[in-house]
Image (cartoon, coloured by chain):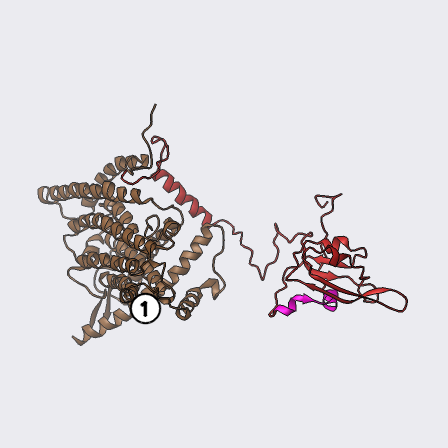
Chain colours: A red, B brown
Amino acid sequence: MAIGVKVMKRPGARASYVRATLQGMLLTLQHIFRPKVTMQYPEEKSTADWAIAPRWRGTHRMLTDEQGRAKCVACGLCPQICPANCIKLVPGEDEQGNRYPLIYEIDEFRCVFCGYCQEVCPEEAIHVGVHYENSEFSRDRFVYDLERLCAQTHPVSSLWDPSDPKGE
Amino acid sequence: MTFFLVTSIVKILVVFTAIMVGVALLTLAERRICAFMQDRLGPNRVGPQGLLQPAADGLKNLVKEETLPAESDKILFMLAPAISFVPALLTFAVIPFASPLPTRWGDVEMVVANLPVGFLYILAFGSLGVYGIVLAGWSSNNKYSLLGGLRASAQMISYEIALGMSTVAVLLLAGNVTLTEVVAKQSQSLLTWNVFPLSLAYFIFLVAAFAETNRLPFDLPEAEGELIAGYHTEYSAMKFSMFYIAEYANMVTASALMATLFFGGYDIPFTHWDNVPPWTPLKTALTLGAFGLKTGFFLFLYIWVRWTLPRFRYDQLMALGWKVMLPLALLYLTVIATLIWFLHARLGWAYDTRFAVVLFGVNLLLAVPLFWVLDRGHIVSGSVTEERA
């Protein structure tokens, strides 16, 4: 060969061009009629063989008690453990000495969705949720305040449990 | 004269519109069929089953920014898309697509221009298309575009010869270069379709036509893995779109040509009434349908092959063109010419089914060793090495 093309060590006797081509054509033709795997997303969010995992860590959610108040006691563990430093917490205290958050904000842009906040929370107040459709038209809408966190209704993530590693 | 002018203008408008709509639908068909072959659904959002997707694409291309590389040859850069676009459409002018349509003022032949030299016209314009690609590659002032353009010219020149040689056999059989006559000659029965008496010529034509339209497995001018996008790397918006339309228009023309030269044109198989006067609008519609089906099948074949086969390496492409296709076409032409002379001049047979069957038998005899050798791949150099014990 004139130009230095790398030649594969392929035995000539077993080489097949016409047969291989026809076999390939047959294969692609068969695939036209096979069932399609595409999930038509906005209409179809889960199929028989695929659904979002219960361990999915998405948009946060603050759980509330019977009176509709956030369960948070402003202990400060979540901003402490947060690796992305996306939780802003200003604690307050009422007349009975109960601590509650004056300001509780999560910046969903900074958040890396590690789920440590849910893991560390002693009151099971802050959770990451099984939810991913959180697009907005402006950047400041991505800072979720306490009211908005409490208003979320999606299911919360069942984080990975070391004693039940396969989620059974 | 007025009749001729009016019908010509109407035919030009109708055929032009039909091709442009066909090209638009073909881009969609390509994407959807490719998706189906990959077990996906493909674009199905714009309009029912995605039918309006080409309109959305077109709109996008119209409003996109036109880029003009600073160091490019401005005039040629602007001209190149048009140069590749126009011949692609012009070629269709001589292809007859239905039986004549009777009107109150006389029969209208269903071909834009029934040139006496129809076939030569196709060869001439078919080879013009490469200018657009070469000029686009050169005027972009981009190494990769230039390489793509050079590849295109080398490839087109190589396969143009095999293409011409394979069709000479058709002309020998038809004894005429007018495409309407070529079609008329084939319409005696199913077996007189040229694909039977000239099967190997059809095979050569098919391979060469894929190379001429720069479709996979011969899309070396684009070769996105090696040359980014080859000759149209620097193009954007409508100028890029023109290359795209040109490629698909070339495919339509090549498919129509295959149908015309080898598959009886607008002839409906197993019947005779569709090829003889008196002409009726129904005949025109039905033959148009037959022609559309045949062309459509070859268009599907183009897409089917594209999404099945990998690209040739450049040296393999050249080896296939010069060492296989050209000698094969020449040899085949000799054999066929001798046979036609023998049957026609010595035995005095007129061209009919018997004539075609004899030629078909000879083709089959030739095809067996040819495909055996092709299959073992000893021809395309560099793909296999000699076995050392």
Can residue A150 be found in the magenta stretch? Answer: yes
Q: Mark 1 packing: few (<14 Cα in 10 Å), some, or many (20+)?
A: few
**In this orientation, does residue B103 appear?**
no
Q: Which residue is mark 1?
A: B17
Depth order, front residue of B192/A118: A118
The residue stretch that appears in magenta: A139-151
Q: Secondary structure at mark 1?
A: helix
Q: Magenta includes B96?
A: no
> Residue B76, how many percent across, how many down?
27, 64
**Residue at image location 22% in from the left, 75% down from the top:** B6
| Quadrant (top left/top right/bottom left/bottom right) for the C terminus of chain B | top left
Determine the chain carrying the residue at label 1: B
Q: Where residue B132 sits: x, y (%)?
A: 27, 60
Q: Quadrant of the N terminus of chain B?
A: bottom left
Residue extending furthest right? A96
Location of residue A34 in the rendering, given as x and y in whole percent from the top left corner: 49, 49
Q: Which SS type dominates the magenta stretch?
A: helix
Q: Identify the residue shown where x is 26% and y is 72%.
A: B10
Q: Is residue A137 visible?
A: yes
